[in-house]
Image: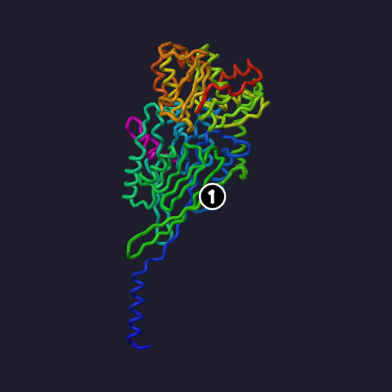
Amino acid sequence: MPRLLTSLTLAAGMALAALSPALAEKINVTIITASDMDTMGDNDGRGGVARLGAVVKGERDKGGNVIFVFPGDLLSPSILAGFDKGEHMVELLNQTPPDMLTPGNHEYDFGPDVFLERMSEANFPKLGTNTRQNGEPIEGFTDTIVKEYKAGEESLKVGFMGLTTDTTPTISSPGNITFLPMIDTAKSTAAALREEGVDIVVAVVHTAQQVDFDLLYQGGVDIVLSGHDHHLHVFYDGRVALVESKEEAEYVTMMDLEFDVTTGDRGRRVRWWPNFRIQDTAKVEPDPDLLARVAAYEETLSTELDVELGTAEIELDTRRISVRTVETVFGNMVADAMRKGVNADIAFTNGGGIRGNKQYDAGHVLTRRDILTELPFGNGTVLLEASGAQVLAALEHGYRAAPEASGSFLHVSGLTAEIDTSKDAGSRVSGVMVNGEPLDPSALYKVATNDFMARGGDGYSMLPATRIIIDADSADLMANDVMVFVKENGGLDTGVDGRLTIN
C-alpha cells in the first residue's frame, strides 16, 4: 500500500476513534409498587400481606438492584384497626419492609398523635417532602432519598421524593400536620435533586390521578409511583412513566428499568427504558410466616365478630364504584339505621365511609364482622339541627361530582331527591321531599350523620354551622346502629327504592 494512503487510513481511524463515544454501560433497576393496603387478609384468594410479602421476597432473592416502594394508605380502615389503630399493619409490613413509604391520607384517620406513634414503629425509610408539622419536617422523615448504582466506570443516581395529597385535611384528621402544594414542591425538589447530580427523578406519591400527570408534565418528574385512586394503571409515553397498582396487593407491579449510561467527548448521557410486569397475586403462593401471623390476628377477632345478625335476602353491593356513584341497598340500610338510632327526621352518610368493596349474594348471613368490614372507621352517629337550606347545601355538595365517583356521595334516609348532572355543581338538586313533604328552606330538621362529616369532613363545610344535639363524645357507633337495625329487622328484603333519581 502506498505510504500516503496508509497515512490517510491511519489518520481517519484515529479521528473516528476520537469522535466515537465510550461504549454505554447498562444498569438495571427493578421498582416494586404496592399501595392502598389497609387489610391484612386476602379477598377470595387474591391480595393480602402474605402474598405481597412473597412477591417482594421473590424479587429480592433474584439479586440485582431492587427497590420496593409503598405510596400510602396502610393504617386504616379495617376491623382490627378499629381496635389497635393500625399497629398490626405496621408490624406486618416490617416483615418485608419497603425501601421507602410515603404516607397516604388514611394514615391520619386516628389523628396526628397516632400517626406519629405508628410511623415511629415502622422499620423503614419514610418520605415526607410536602409534609410538615408546625412548619417543620417531621422527625423520622426525609424529604429525599438518593440511590446510586454502578456498572464498570459508570454510575447512576436515582432521586426519590414523597408527596401526600394536600386534600388530606379535608378527607382525614391530620390536626397540626400540614401539606405543602404538591406541584410547586415537586418542581423545587426535582430541581434541587438534579443540582446534586441525580440522573432521574422519581416521585412516590399518594395523589389523585390528575395530579399524577401534572407531576409528570409540570413538576419536573420522570417517573410517578402512585396510590390513592385504587386503579391499576401503567403509562409510558416515551419520556415519562406512571405506575399505580390498584389496592390490597391484588396486583403488584414491577417496573424493570434499563439505563444506558454513556460518557464521551460530548459529555454524559443517560437513556432509560421501562418494562412492566403486572403480577396477579391470585397466582402467588403466600409467604408461610406472614400467613401464620395473619391467622393469629384473625383468630383474636373471630369470637367477637363471627356472630350472626340477620340474612340479606337480596344481593348487597358495597363495591367502591357503586357506593360512590349510585343509590345502593347497603347505603340505604346504613342511613335508615342511623336515622332510627337517634330518632332523626332525615339521615345521610358519605359513600366513602363504606369500605368493604364486596358483593354479598342473596341469602348471605350478615355478621358483626361484615358490618365492621363495611364501616371500619369507628365513626359515631351524631344528631344535628339543620335548616332546610343547610340540608339542601349538603345534598348539592354530595352530588357535585356525579356521575363521577366521589367519597362524598350521599346515601340518604327520610328524603327523596332528583339530581340533574347536566347542570352546574351547586344547582343540581331539586324536588327534595322530606317524609312526603317538600323541603322547607326555613324549617328546622333533625339530621343524623356521622361525626366526620359533622365536623366538616369530605368538604361538608355547612355542617359545623348547625346546632349539635348529640355530639361525637355522646354518640353511639354507626356500626352498632347498623348491627342493631339488622338484628331487629331479621331478613333484609328491601331493594333500592328510588330515594335518588340521578339523570
Using a 10 Å C-alpha cutoff, classify the residue at mark 1 as few (fewer than 14 neighbours), some (14 to 19) or many (20 or more): few
Classify the position of the N terminus by image quarter.
bottom left
Residues 236 and 178: in front is 236
Extreme-right residue of the structure: 363
Residues 53 and 364: in front is 364
Corner quadrant of residue 355: top right
| Residue 141 among magenta residues | yes
Q: Where is residue 499 in the image (x, y as percent from the top left)?
A: 54, 21
Examine the rendering and report whether any part of residue 434 can be seen. yes
- Name the residue at 62% across, 45% down: 283
Query: In terms of secondary structure, where does tag 1 sit?
Result: strand
The magenta stretch is 124-142
Determine which residue is flagged by label 1: 277
Examine the rendering and report whether any part of residue 112 can be seen. no
Q: Position of residue 124 (x, y in %)?
A: 46, 40
Amino acid type assigned to the residue bearing label 1 in the image: Arg
- Name the residue at 33% across, 83% down: 7
* Left or right of residue 54, residue 198 in this image: left
